[in-house]
Structure formats: structure tokens, C-alpha cells
Amino acid sequence: MLLAKLIENINPLEVHGSPMVEVLSLELNSKIVTSGQLFFALRGEKSDGHNYIEDAINKGAIAVVCEKLPEKINSVVCYIVVVDSHKALGIMASVFYGNPSRKLKLVGITGTNGKTTTVTLLYRLFRLLGNKVGLLSTVTNFIDDEEIPATHTTPDAITINKLLATMVKKGCDYCFMEVSSHAIIQKRIEGLEFAGAIFSNITHDHLDYHKTFAEYLRAKKMFFDHLSSTAFALTNIDDKNGKVIVQNTRAKVKTYALKTMADYNCRVIESSFEGMQLVVSGLDVWTRFIGTFNAYNLLAVYATADLLGVEKDEALRLLSALEAVAGRFEYVRGKNNIVAIVDYAHTPDALENVLNTINDIRKNGEQLITVVGCGGNRDATKRPEMARIAVENSDRVILTSDNPRDEEPAAILEDMKAGLDSAQRSKTLFIIDRHEAIRTAVMLAQSGTIILVAGKGHETYQEIRGEKKHFDDKEILMQELNELKMN
């Protein structure tokens, strides 16, 4: 595509060189630039793409988008100077790939918890309706039935538009995607046109990046502020910030709730480890999901389906056919009726929701053992709170490693331990090795015990000192439960 065409909508501060050149592709990583590419110099947390402009040119870049001209100018390269390279990337990537978000119905969901479950269930429901559908999620991406591994909750703007363009080419009518707060701030969704947006909830998370809760909330709100008047904005008004999120949006606002009168309401009638009986907008439906948090997720799915034109009865029928998402309250039964649950809960609110759900269902005398850790190089302020919540809502707790990344696992455990008093520490074990922690939980289990392994969910790796090693909580639980059967 001609560079002059690509820059029509970005209002550059300066164009140094001729834009009448053909751009073969877009790239933001100088290490993999090839001949004929347009290179975007992006400022990041750890590095500045402006330092690699010359490297990109030496590898064949014919044009550069930057916020500041380099000292050394190459006479055969066109430099596009802009206020914000991230914003320019989003807009130009959309144009380069033919504005694919306008050619299907793109629905995004943001919030602290529930994003993956909601978009995955929407993807499955709309496929059951006979549609070709795309999915962009933390766990994986799909172009109809073709699976593409996910590396981020929300990919970079080039990857998003490339995936959306392929979805359009393959005949997809819808795409459901998670929209992270990082992606909003970094303008990875700039240039996309959303048919609708969903707000699930907002709680303590990512303060290592946003620094304050107010900034975290502002990031989520920005998504709704930029919706068009033709889109819908579906918000959970049981969350105290549910109305704040949509107060400046131009989109058509719709609400959902379990505790408050809303456009879409739901009540939990009966709950067990096998599923829930719900009343959704006055109609009964049995689902295979567990917990109030999943009732919110299912209600958001139902409301979105209705807003996209699906018949209410058909939407409810399909809700009852859907199954749990990988790593989201997945459970298995072992010897002596031991119930083992794997969940991705890695925030205080998510952990408390899962534990409350278990405690609502378990019967008198059934012991609850919780295995949980906290990730390294992430918001450290939630560590003591996570430990406190685990201990206050469990009979026994084993604090262990999650993904320590570049931090010392023992130091992370010390941060968690700081949230406990002496009495709470007495019913807590501290086992750094996560496999050993899970094994210990199984060995401590008695007849009817419930084991919760929280924090990693669907992840099949553990990241230690920059190295990812295979590690699957569910796999290890199954292994240990099976070995227990042989005793």
C-alpha cells in the first residue's frame, strides 16, 4: 500500500522525504525488519524504539514513523513524525489491512475478572448458532475453527488487524475479544470500530503498571469513551463503578445485574458442583457453571446475544449447552470423593469469589484446602491480601510459587506472609515448590475434602528467571490424585 494513503488520517507533524513509496508490511520490532517495511518507533516501559531506527533502516525499512527525527537522516527513507507513535500504529494498521473491524461485528470486554470466560462463551454460543466467529483471548485465539496461540491478553495493533483481516477473509461475521487496560493505555485498539463493549467489574489489579486505582479505572473508561453512537455499552451496575465507566460514552447504554434492577437481571436458584439453576430475565435455565461470578458472566453473554439480535429463548437454550472454560473453576473428583478445583483467580477479588462459591456449596465437615501463590514482577501490594483471604476462607492453606519470574520465590512468600497474624500462620504451610505444594494438599486430603489450586488456571508453564518450563496445575492434580488411588 502506498505510504501516502496510510498517513491520510494520522495528521503527521512532519513528513521528511517522499511518501510516494509502496509499503509491503508493517513492523514494530527492529530485530525482524525486512526489505520494504514501514517501521514504527514506539516508546515502551523498558526500551525506546527510537534507539533502533538506524538498525531497522539497515535491515531494509523504507519508512519510519517516529515522535522525534533521529540525528542521522537517511535520504532514501521517508520519516513520518507524529505526536504519538502508538496511536498512529493503530490507525495505520487498520487502514493497511482494509479496516477489517468495520466488516464484522467486533465486541470487546474489559474488566478485572470474567473477560476470558465471557468472550469464550460468546464465541462458542455464536458458533452453535451457525456463524463463523473469531476469538481474541488470554488463553488462545480462534479464526472460526482454526486455533492460533495467544501471547498477550490483547495483541499489538498489527497482530489484531492481521487476525481480523483473516477472519473477514474466512467469512467470520463476529469477533469477540478481551480488551486489557494495558492495551487501552498503549492504544493497541486505536482505529478499531466496535459494535459493542462489555464492562464486567473492576477490582485491585495491575497497580504495578497503573500505579493508582484511579488510573486503572481511567484506562477502562477510555474504552467506552471512544465508542461510536452506533455501538452498545453493556455494564455491570452491581459494581460501584459500573455507571462511572459509561458516563461519557456515546454508545447506547444497557445494564445487567444480579442485585440491582437493570435491563438484564439474573437470580441463582440452586447451586452445586455440577451446575446452577438460574432465572434469567424471568426464564429458568440450568447451566453447567458454578458460582455467582459465573452467573454474572452468563448474564453478560445472554445480554450481548440479545443486543446482537439473537432470540432470547434460543440464547438461553444454548447457555445450558455451554461448558466451563479451561482453568476457570475446572474440577475433578478423586478417591474418597475428593473434589479438586483449578482456577485462574490471581486477584484478591477473584480468589474471594471462588472461595465464597466453594463455601456456599460445601457441606458441614468437608475440609477446604487452598493452594495459592502470587506472580513475580507484578503488583506486590495484593500479596498480603491474597494470603489473608485464602486463610480466612479455608481450613488449611499452602502458600507457594506462582510465576516468580525475576523475583525470589521466598521473598514473594514473605510478602504474602505479612498479611497473616500468628494464629493464621499456624494453619498455613509455606512450600516454595508448586508441585510439592499440590502433592502435599492431596496427601492432607481426607474423605470429602475440597482442594482449590488457584492462580495459574489454564497456563501450562511456570516462568522462572526468564525461562518457561512446562507446568500444568490440572495435570499435576490428576497425577497426584491417581497416585493416591494406588495407595
Image (cartoon, rainbow, N blue to C red):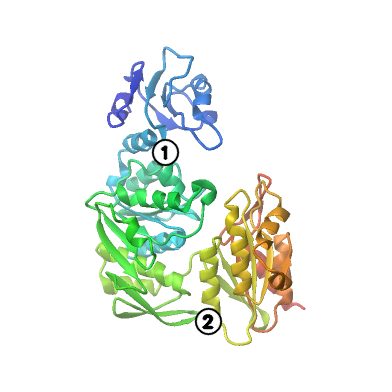
Front residue of 130/350: it is 350
Residue 111 vs 66, above or below: the answer is below
Question: Measured from the top left, where is residue 98 in percent x and y?
Answer: 30, 38
**Label 2: which residue?**
361
Whether residue 121 can be seen here: yes
As drawn, is 243 to the left or to the right of 140?
A: left
Amino acid carrying label 2: it is Ile
Q: Which residue is drawn at the image coordinates 59% and 74% (left, top)?
A: 393
Nearer mark to the viewer, of 2 and 1: 2
Residue 46 vs 167, above or below: the answer is above
Helix, strand or loop at label 1? It is helix
Residue 439, quarter of picture: bottom right
Judged from this view, the residue extending furthest toward the front is 421
Question: Measured from the top left, where is residue 158 in percent x and y?
Answer: 42, 38
**Label 1: which residue?**
158
Quarter containing the C terminus: bottom right
Q: Which residue is drawn at the image coordinates 53% and 81% (left, top)?
A: 361
Q: Do labels 2 and 1 touch, CB within 8 Å?
A: no
